[in-house]
Image (spheres, rainbow, N blue to C red):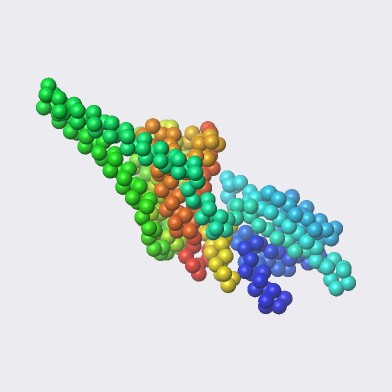
Amino acid sequence: MSDIYRNALESLNTGILVFDGDGKLAYMNPAAEEIFQGSAQILKGKHYRTLFRGSPSAVRIARKAIAENAAVTGFDVELRLSHRGAELPPLSAIIGASPLSGTEGEPQGAVVSIKPADFFTMAEQDEMAALSAEEMQMLAYGIAHEIRNPLGGILGAAQWILRRETSDEERSEGVRLIQREAGRINNLVEKMLEMGKSPRSAKPFPLLPLLLEAEELLKSEVRAKGKEISFERRVDPSLPNVSGHPDTIFRAIVNILKNSVEAIEGKGTIRIDARMNVNFRVSRGKGRKLSFLEISITDDGAGMSEEDSRKAFLPFFTTKPMGTGLGLVMARQAVTRNGGKLEIKSVRGAGTTVRISLPVEPGKKAAR
């Protein structure tokens, strides 16, 4: 293979695998290495049935191209790859296979392309993060609602204090009420100002110490609430550093963990996983790739309906009596501003999983 063709294949975000006429792997590009979490050197020579074991649809697609010399494409193909945890759904992908022919037209194998269905370009990510008309409406309503309520309390307390017949004790209570409600407004304003600040410069930092600190913080809250919640953590200490600002990412993780604690009534489990994310991969030009590390926070709490899940990132939307509806909004902003993404999947009565994908420090790769 000439250098120009090899460089072109290795610059693609789509996984490319080339099989010979016997169905054995002859070549795979870096994108395919990340999907399979294995190097081309180790996987070379393996049969497609071995590589796609547990994924019958993928096997059929490869077999049709190799054995029947026919081009075929499969959408939403489920890839059950060994590196993915058993509790996670299979990797959904678009798989295309085209037969390879020799100079005389004789079959010589096939080229298989794999593009994870969950792949996002940076442009698509920015579009998702932009405020929609519905979000703007919810934002305006939420600000008005959050300010009007404490203002009503402040005005009522002021009128109470000004009455001649009000006792000193009642005036003191009115002053305390004004201070409390003014504090609520100040807290809201501080959150809004935080959301409006320019993002801090990204820098590399290890993820594990940050997760440990957030977990310990929430364990204290669990004890204070009298709940029985166990934390299960599966994080490989050899994972590479991520790129971002540790303070804002820490607050985002704490917000998500707090939501998990509040969603569990009495007794439950919160699981924290971290692994390389093969679904989210961005090209930076000249063959450079930006890889991502995924944090999954899963609870077995009350969960949310499909409609509430859709609205979860709307400013001021909340299902909690004392919630502001800004926690997840600020968490998503902290993640996306650093070039990552945040998504939520929830089932009523079964729990919630929040996944955060953060860019890996440039030039670093996960240990094989």
Q: Quadrant of the N terminus?
A: bottom right
Quarter where residue 33 is shown: bottom right
**Residue at left offset 28%, top offset 43%:** 186
**Residue at left offset 78%, top offset 67%:** 20
For the image shown, how many numbered marks are present on the structure?
0
**Residue at left offset 29%, top offset 39%:** 184
| Front residue (pair 317, 72) | 317
**Percent position of residue 194, x then y:** 35, 51
**Percent position of residue 37, x then y:** 60, 60
Left or right, 96 with reference to 187: right
Residue 24 seen anywhere in this rendered image of the structure: no
**Percent position of residue 280, x then y:** 57, 57
Left or right, 231 with reference to 96: left
**Residue at left offset 29%, top offset 40%:** 185
| Front residue (pair 154, 338) | 154
Quarter where residue 104 is shown: bottom right
